[in-house]
Image (tube, grey):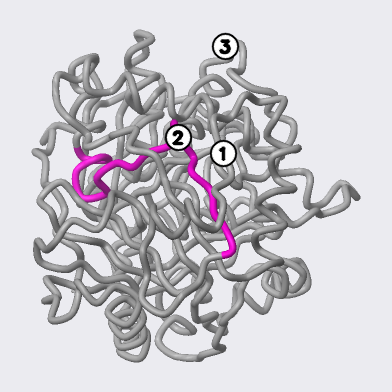
């Protein structure tokens, strides 16, 4: 089942024109719409389902600089700053708290990687410290595990996936943005290779600037215009408990990850466990992705099923006048893996006996959209003037989302970029650059 997501009102009237149309109402699209509208631009956000309905409400909720790839570290600082500012700007809580994150491990290699990462992080002033075995045991007491050490990332935190994107999108209305749910963008109206409008199922919005922040659907949307965006999605499973005992705010161990929510419940998951569904799009981009999947996924299963024929990675062609795949699947809501749910419960209750007998409130599947180097694309789309992309969070896009949205807004508005956009350019996959697989 889907996680429960805050619902927001629709603007019924589709504007005839807008300075910018944002496609996709996840954390990236919502933030970009907010920041563009705040700058005085007229913005229409269109979403085929409901705001926050896909990956933005199905993640752990962690907002971190810890263990990020070097290319993402400047952007992660921007993201945390934007997270900090939302509540005051909107007048409503998005659930962001700088509670700190705790990591512990009994794997010497993992501990060495965390230690080595500190050299990467030093120039970026990340507030983090290593924990001794004794400190790790005190911070995360676990049954039957002897931690070798751990990490406390002091300034990192978490936000509430169920409310963040809808609250931010709603906040964009304060600055004049309009929000259109159940309104799929079928395609672009192009004149001489430049954007002249967005064709939606409810009519066309005239615009010269489009930001496609469509998550797992971005590559499919762009394919219509010959824009090559190598994107693959892995299917993951998480669950949420009913409110229970307080074990800590945000905890990572090799066995499981726990995130305490505002109501005292926990989101539970296993890092690195996922299913890679074989799909037409996946086969098309397979050679791009093999290094990343081999490097990053500790427990990947290969599957074939519905997603071969339906959804963002299936074959399909349509035009602006016909029903598109985006309308056929309003919300990407894969079934959770029962085997993974059982494994999560077993690992959590074995490691933390206080959680014995926990009740599951809900569980869900999710498609995590990845790039070949596990670093997002935030870039103009080569070959289509006025089209910009912001997607490919690769499993850490929620916390980074406001930073991604900020940089995307800078590029669309032709303002000074908040960070160097070069590492995030789409062309890095085709211009002969060496693909370096990023950190998880």
Name the spot of residue 51 as percent of width and height, x first.
24, 46
Kindly identify the residue that appears in the image at 16 percent across and 53 percent down. 5
Residue 249 located within the stretch drawn in magenta? no
Q: Secondary structure at mark 3?
A: loop
Pointer 1 with pointer 2, Cβ within 8 A: yes
Q: CA distance from mark 3 to mark 1?
A: 36 Å
Whichever of callouts 1 and 2 sits on the residue coming sooner in the sequence is 1
Q: Which mark is residue 154?
A: 2
Which callout, 3 or 2, points to the residue nearer the camera? 2
| N-terminal label among 3 and 1 | 1
Relative placement, left or right, of 216 versus 132 is left
- Residue pointed to by mark 3: 415
Q: Which residues are magenta?
A: 148-166
Q: Is residue 284 above or below residue 4?
A: below
Quadrant in which the N terminus appears: bottom left
> CB under 8 Å between callouts 3 and 1?
no
Q: Which residue is nearer to you in this view: 66 or 141? A: 141
Residue positioned 18% across, 16% down in the render: 174
Q: Which residue is mark 1?
A: 129
Residue 72 seen in render: yes
Q: Is residue 161 magenta?
A: yes
Image-based side of 91 in relation to 131, left or right? left
Query: At 62% across and 34% down in the image, what residue appears?
Result: 73
Which element is circle 1 on? Answer: strand
**Cα distance between the residues tagged 1 and 2:** 8 Å
Question: Is 138 in front, or is 387?
Answer: 138
User: In which image quadrant can residue 81 be found?
Assistant: top left
Residue 14 vs 24, above or below: the answer is above
- The image shows residue 325, relative to residue 338, as above or below, that is above
């Amino acid at each position: 089942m889907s996680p429960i997501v805050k619902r927001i009102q629709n603007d019924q009237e589709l504007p005839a024109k807008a300075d910018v149309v944002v496609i996709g109402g996840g954390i990236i699209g919502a933030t970009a719409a907010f920041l563009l509208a705040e700058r005085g631009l007229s913005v229409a956000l269109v979403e085929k389902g409901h705001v926050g309905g896909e990956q933005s409400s199905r993640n752990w909720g962690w907002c971190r600089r810890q263990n990020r790839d070097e290319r993402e570290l400047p952007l992660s600082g921007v993201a945390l700053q934007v997270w900090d500012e939302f509540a005051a700007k909107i007048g409503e809580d998005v659930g962001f708290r700088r509670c700190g994150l705790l990591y512990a491990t009994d794997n010497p290699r993992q501990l060495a990687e965390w230690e080595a990462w500190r050299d990467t992080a030093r120039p970026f002033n990340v507030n983090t410290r290593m924990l001794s075995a004794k400190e790790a045991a005190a911070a995360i007491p676990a049954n039957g595990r002897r931690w070798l050490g751990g990490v406390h990332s002091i300034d990192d935190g978490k936000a509430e996936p169920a409310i963040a994107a809808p609250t931010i999108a709603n906040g964009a209305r304060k600055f004049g943005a309009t929000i259109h749910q159940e309104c799929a963008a079928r395609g672009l109206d192009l004149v001489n290779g430049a954007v002249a409008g967005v064709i939606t199922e409810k009519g066309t919005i005239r615009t010269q600037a489009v930001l496609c922040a469509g998550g797992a659907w971005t590559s499919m949307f762009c394919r219509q215009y010959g824009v090559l965006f190598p994107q693959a999605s892995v299917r993951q499973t998480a669950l949420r408990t009913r409110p229970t005992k307080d074990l800590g705010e945000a905890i990572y161990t090799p066995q499981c990850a726990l995130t305490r929510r505002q109501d005292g419940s926990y989101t539970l998951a296993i890092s690195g466990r996922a299913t890679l569904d074989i799909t037409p799009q996946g086969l098309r981009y397979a050679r791009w992705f093999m290094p990343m999947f081999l490097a990053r996924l500790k427990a990947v299963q290969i599957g074939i099923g519905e997603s071969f024929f339906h959804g963002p990675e299936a074959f399909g062609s349509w035009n602006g006048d016909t029903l598109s795949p985006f309308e056929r699947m309003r919300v990407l809501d894969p079934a959770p893996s029962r085997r993974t749910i059982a494994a999560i419960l077993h690992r959590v209750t074995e490691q933390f006996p206080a959680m014995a007998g926990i009740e599951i409130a809900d569980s869900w599947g999710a498609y995590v959209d990845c790039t070949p180097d596990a670093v997002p694309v935030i870039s103009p789309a080569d070959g289509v003037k006025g089209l910009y992309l912001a997607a490919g969070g690769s499993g850490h896009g929620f916390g980074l989302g406001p930073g991604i949205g900020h940089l995307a807004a800078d590029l669309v508005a032709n303002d000074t970029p908040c960070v160097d956009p070069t590492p995030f350019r789409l062309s890095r996959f085709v211009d002969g650059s060496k693909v370096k697989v990023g950190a998880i």
